[in-house]
């Protein structure tokens, strides 16, 4: 009897297989201390599961993040504190800096790189303050957990081309959407000044066009 091969679904097609980053594992020396630290930052506690021989898995998720963080006992052979360069994207670097500091994170100052783009290793080439033009991707702040695992905040307000599907905009939280709406409202206000208020009736379409183009890295309407 011949066996019919199953028809591949979109997710199983060889030319398009979604591979979404779901979890990052970080090494810690004291699980309870790490759990207290990360939940103290306001990260959601998803799971705390123990098994035989001291095995333990704790999963937490930063607010608005589609990717979670796992740590525990016997979950990784990496040395505690060896995870470095983990990035948390925020829409307002100074607001996020203040919020995390108020929750107990020992924050660096807000900084930008003297090259004007991504940051160098460690503290090399750091200049104090956000990027002078507040360019998207250009402003940072850093902190470490009690074991020394290193995190960076990165301010992103407009995505590079290709980072988001050009057919639509994506927001991971109500806060992100609110920030985007504030930006587009400000841009629309400037548009109205230049336009003399001739096209007020088209503002929903203008807002939608701006949001999609900002998220997909296209040229913004003026």
Image (spheres, helix red, strand yellow):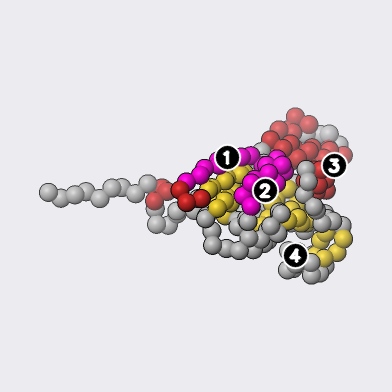
Query: Which residue does the image show at 75% across and 46% down from the upper left?
Result: 91
Residue 190 tag number: 3
Q: CA distance from mark 1 to mark 4?
A: 31 Å
Closer to the camera: disc 4 or disc 3?
Answer: 4
Q: What label sits on residue 119 in the rendered view?
A: 4
Magenta stretch: includes residue 46: yes
Element type where label 3 sits in the image: helix
Give the residue at mark 1. Answer: 46
Q: CB under 8 Å between callouts 2 and 1?
A: no
Among numbered discs 3 and 2, the one appearing first in the sequence: 2
Q: Secondary structure at mark 1?
A: strand
Mark positioned earlier in the residue sequence (2 or 4): 2
Query: At which x and y percent is residue 113?
Result: 80, 65
Residue drawn at point x = 80 percent, y = 53 percent: 107
Among the two numbered marks 1 and 3 on one chain, the one whose residue lies closer to the N terminus: 1
Q: Residue 33 bears which disc, if any?
A: 2
Location of residue 124 by image quarter = bottom right
- What whole-number distance in Å separates the C-alpha atoms at marks 1 and 3? 43 Å
In the rendered view, does 17 fall on the left or right side of 118? Answer: left
Q: Nearer the viewer, residue 149 or 124?
A: 149
């Amino acid at each position: 009897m011949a066996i019919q091969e199953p028809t591949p679904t979109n997710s199983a097609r060889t030319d398009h297989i979604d591979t979404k980053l779901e979890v990052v594992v970080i090494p810690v020396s004291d699980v309870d201390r790490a759990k207290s630290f990360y939940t103290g930052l306001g990260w959601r506690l998803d799971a705390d599961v123990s098994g035989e021989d001291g095995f333990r898995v704790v999963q937490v998720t930063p607010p608005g993040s589609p990717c979670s963080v796992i740590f525990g006992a016997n979950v990784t052979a990496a040395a505690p504190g060896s995870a470095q360069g983990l990035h948390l994207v925020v829409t307002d670097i100074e607001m996020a800096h203040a919020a995390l500091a108020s929750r107990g994170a020992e924050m660096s100052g807000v900084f930008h790189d003297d090259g004007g783009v991504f940051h160098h290793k460690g503290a090399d080439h750091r200049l104090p303050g956000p990027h002078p033009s507040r360019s998207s991707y250009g402003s940072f702040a850093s902190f470490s957990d009690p074991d020394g695992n290193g995190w960076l905040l990165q301010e992103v307000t407009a995505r590079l081309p290709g980072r988001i599907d050009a057919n639509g905009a994506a927001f991971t939280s109500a806060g992100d959407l609110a920030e985007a709406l504030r930006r587009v409202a400000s841009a629309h206000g400037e548009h109205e000044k230049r336009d003399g208020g001739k096209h007020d009736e088209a503002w929903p379409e203008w807002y939608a066009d701006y949001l999609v183009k900002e998220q997909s890295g296209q040229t913004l309407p003026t």
